[in-house]
Image: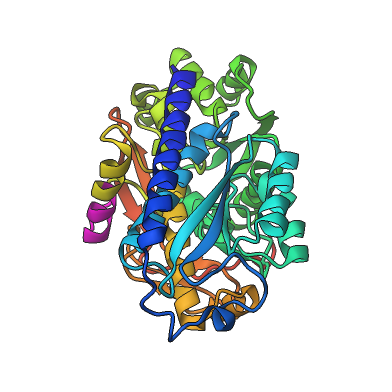
Amino acid sequence: MHCEVKKSISAAIVSAALCLAASSALAVEEWVNTQLETYPTDKVCTTGLAVDDNTVTVGQLHSISGTMAISETGSVEAERLAIKQINDMGGVLGRKIEIIQEDGASDWPTFAEKAKKLLVQDKVASVFGCWTSASRKAVLPIFEHENGMLYYPTFYEGLEASKNVIYTGQEATQQILWGLDWAYEKGCRTFFLIGSDYIWPRTSNKIARRHIENHLKGCKVVGEEYYPLGHTSFGSLINKVKLKKPDCIYSIVVGGSNVSWYKQLHAAGITGDSLAKKGKLLLTISTTEDEILGIGGENCAGFYACMKYFQSLDNPNNKDFVQAFKEMWGDDSVIGDVTQAAYLGPWLWKYTVEKAGSFDIDAIAAASPGIEFKGAPEGYVRIAENHHLWSRARIGKMLEDGQFEVLAESKDLIEPNPFPEGYK
């Protein structure tokens, strides 16, 4: 079933891309840049980017195949929705946004290869892409060497800030620390850390361990385990968890492995209800509505996630976003935290270009701090000097219908601090 879901979603994206390309070819001929006199091409693009009088070309670089497709497909869809809405409003500096899409195929060298193609060959004005920290780390030297701009949508471990990246997801202090503090308030004193085996889960759990052992009074880590991306057999891990009896199972399992992980937990009798009866819980920072679509809500109901966005958020911005997303991608589509963060990318880029009056990367990098998006589905975001976003943290409880019940929210926007003292 999981593979069928991925194939159908990927097929839908390819079909939609073809339709958009076909309609775009017709529409560009009819496109009239009413702002050309104010923003002539030789003034708004001085560095050879793919910008002409009527169009500006951007790149999309996500996995629409392989184990990460279950997580990244939503990002592709959200970015395409934002770009369509921006084009419907007249584009950016009067220019229609065109898209070149590449498939990172859940393979980090492929991400690097495709990033270089987009920047060197296609000369795209910006790239919306990546999901895993491994893919971001693979493309980062290319973006910095070729002076490109990446809008990266995923919550991540922090400990990074680049002139050539806008981080629209949360860093560690906005998710890991806040979520662990919530678990502590719920009575958790022992933690079992679990993750997929690559840089984000390992670094995140390193930060989590330091917070648990150094900042949460009377707490300790009783287990820490990692498994390769795509891993599907969690029987031995579940036995170790049963033996240690942690108050909190802290899960950073990523991509398609989530399906096996939660189904096998359910089969072993570890459910939200069974943990709650013992005053225990499972808290994840990696499982969203996108993954639950493949997992099945009945296999994970009662577990918790710390995110900044849930599809069920009750605010006018989000209601409009959810309606538009479903109109474009179907009533069965769902929207997770990273999908929403991906939607922010094209809008933040548009506002930055308009502030700078230029598509050039150096101008975008300089103009980014202070850019606001008041229509953000999560409520409101603003870019900080370090190219991360001010945003809130929230706790949601997984429901059988695949959605979340929002239980807690940070009082204020949390200032991004990718290099917190004592956690490096």
Q: Which residues are magenta?
A: 313-322
Q: Is residue 225 above or below residue 83?
A: above
Q: Residue at x 40, y 73 (%)?
A: 94
Horizontal and vertical percent position of residue 149: 62, 64
Q: Quadrant of the C terminus?
A: bottom right
- Residue 71 visible in rendering: yes
Q: Nearer the viewer, residue 112 or 98?
A: 98
- Residue 306 visible in rendering: no
* 233 magenta-colored: no
Horizontal and vertical percent position of residue 27: 37, 56
Question: How many discs mark residues in the rendered view?
Answer: 0
| Image side of residue 334 versus residue 266, left or right | left
* 314 magenta-colored: yes
Q: Residue at x 55, y 80 (%)?
A: 44
Q: Is residue 187 above or below residue 360?
A: above
Q: Nearer the viewer, residue 251 or 356?
A: 356
Residue 255 location, quadrant: top right
